[in-house]
Amino acid sequence: MGMTMLGKGRKAISMILDEGSFVEGKIDEYTLPDIGPGAVIGTGSLKGRKIAVIANDAMVRNPRFPVVYSGVIGMEEAYKMATTVYKMIELDKDKPQGEKRPLVLIVDTPGNGPGKVEELFGMNKATGAYQLSLAEARQHGHPIVAMIIGRAISGAFLCHGLQADHILSLSEEFQTMIHVMPLAGIARITKRDIESLTELSKTNPVFASGAGFFYKLGGLEELVNSVDDMKDTIDRHITEIYKCNAEGNSEKCRPSPFPSPSVLKYTPLLPWQTHHTYDV
Amino acid sequence: MALQELNFSFKPEKNFTSFAPEWFHSGVVGSGDMEVLMEHKKQDGKVTVKVVTPVTGFDQVWEKVLAKFVAETKIGNLHMEINDNNATPFIVHMRLKQALFEAKGDVES
Amino acid sequence: MRKWEEMQERSFYESTARERAINLVDKGTFTELLAPIDKMTSPHLPILGEAVSFDDGVVTGVGKIGKRPVFVISQEGRFIGGAVGEVHGAKMVATFRLAQQSYEKIKEKYPNDYESRIPAVVISFETGGVRLHEANAGLLAHAEVMEQIQHCRGKIPVIGLVGSKVGCFGGMGFVVVATDMVIMSDRGRIGLTGPEVIEEAMGKKEFDASDKSLIYRITGGKHKYIMRDAAYLVKDTIGDFHKQVAEALKMSYDEVQSHRCIGSLKLVEEQLELVKIAAENNFKDATDVWAYFGNKKSDQIQDQFYDEFIREAKRRPRR
């Protein structure tokens, strides 16, 4: 069993960014609102390259929203993240393509705020706002790399990860978790026994959980097998995305495995372009 | 665990009417319900049916219900595909008759 | 199939996805794309022994409202709770792409007069979000749909309708509020987290998942209308939804955009002010929030009929 980075978002920032370069709570001269302590945000450099980083801190509680702790992305956290992305777009708006600063998302989140106030005031809007901001940043040419160091679960992964150009993950030895619901939960809801589901997931990664399966499906760009490799791997992917964007291949920069070939057999009826195949 | 597929073929009644529309769809695959896709198919009046269902062990019940439908409606030159989700024989019979009725109405209007 | 005129009077809530799709656009204009005859069933459900459907729980197609092509996506809650699987999601994304292609073609053909002809995308939501039987594909589908909504920005109005039995929950709960304009009926519901999960997180004392009335107050159309998550509240007939969409299509693109909840820094700042209000007040129920925004008889709102509610409701002020 290797070490785990679960709950260590801050440590991951220091491992990924150049030493002493991280400035928290600010994007250039702009000071981020002092809310959502579970969202650790700032700028720094990665192998000399100026970037912004958005990470989860699983060690703090939000004093105003009791269900938001342990890396949960609540309303304050999600809007703070969205604010960051929009500020980056604004600050870099006059920069040419290739100089728009990258965003690095360090992902370790178990979900969105599951509370009554969250439903009343719109957790859905907060997580949706963050997703739209990331999609817009990509349109403008900001490379976005998500690095999963711990949990990447359901709606929280959708906002903090799945809108990236490239998604990387520490391999499963690091106890990373990627899923909508663990297989046991899926077994309960679909009324199937877990043994046969486990067996089936070996040939069909479409409902299985875990980084390995998500990689097989094509949802992950690369599995990272050592924490020391995170920095170099992220850097390499940023370079790749810049290159893709420069070639006008922005669609290719974000090679979604969706839909899979089994669905693509209907291609004549669908205006798809696809870049990926199952790697099973 | 996999879904099962049943296939049936019925000889038409002597004085059968051909299914006229090119195709007609009816129903929603809700729990305890089904959908049917009816297609005109020139096949000497025969009625062929493909049933896809999660329920096992009811092959003979399906055959009976479908045979009754073919006999009662005197329909022919029809291929049907049914996606079933635990519909009772009564529901199946009702849905098929309803679908055929609607399919004819569709042609008239 | 019942006549279009008859269907306009029919309950949106009680109708099927196909009935909604056909009758949301002008009479006789709807063409279904990837219709049941294409037999595009899920390749994943049979392995799990789960019933399949020829449309995989979503009706997609194109019709017209006035001069405008309207691309329709209509989810069917009766099929696995309207949950989004791979084919279902692919049909949604493909519809968005077709709408964008159509936009480009229309712009090319009518360079001086395209604004009155630009297409719209209308989504009737009836879903609990990701289909667990094909969870990973469902997750990716959600991300792709969000991206498509962003691609439509500045070009094609995207309108979300919620008035169905299942409502709009899970991942689709944030997709719906990412559209330009949400139209709901009182019976429609929008949320993110399921009631059982909230009860688990907060305890039964704070949130009782079996209290249907509480859940309706929090997720229902009236609350979303007061909060302005829903731009319009309509009566529960297909015709009322159709009329409201037609009204929206008469608006300028900017006017449609003015109904967005999220999608810019300005809107995020506006929502953050709301979150501040949430943090500063100890709201126990939707009625407390309604009272905060100036609804004096907030405890009677849930029982109010449509006309009375629309006449009297005080909505959250826009900044």
Image: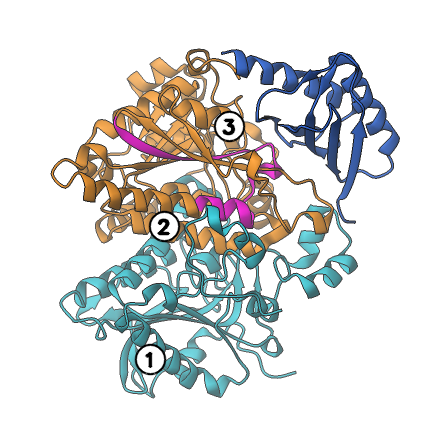
Chain colours: A cyan, B blue, C orange
Q: Which mark is residue C18?
A: 3
Chain holding disc 2: C
Q: CA distance from mark 1 to mark 3?
A: 47 Å
- Residue B89 visible in this rendered orientation of the protein: yes
Q: CA distance from mark 3 to mark 2?
A: 23 Å
Disc 1 is placed on an element classified as helix
Q: Which residues are magenta?
A: C67-92
- Residue C295 visible in this rendered orientation of the protein: no
Disc 3 is placed on an element classified as helix
Q: Is residue A228 left or right of residue A249?
A: right
Q: Which residue is mark 2?
A: C148
Tell me if mark 1 has few (under 14), some (14-19) or many (20+) residues whose alpha carbon lies within 10 angstroms of its own: some
Q: Which mark is residue A239?
A: 1
Q: Position of residue C262 (x, y in %)?
A: 30, 46
- Type of amino acid at the residue the image marks with label 3: Arg
- Type of amino acid at the residue the image marks with label 2: Gln
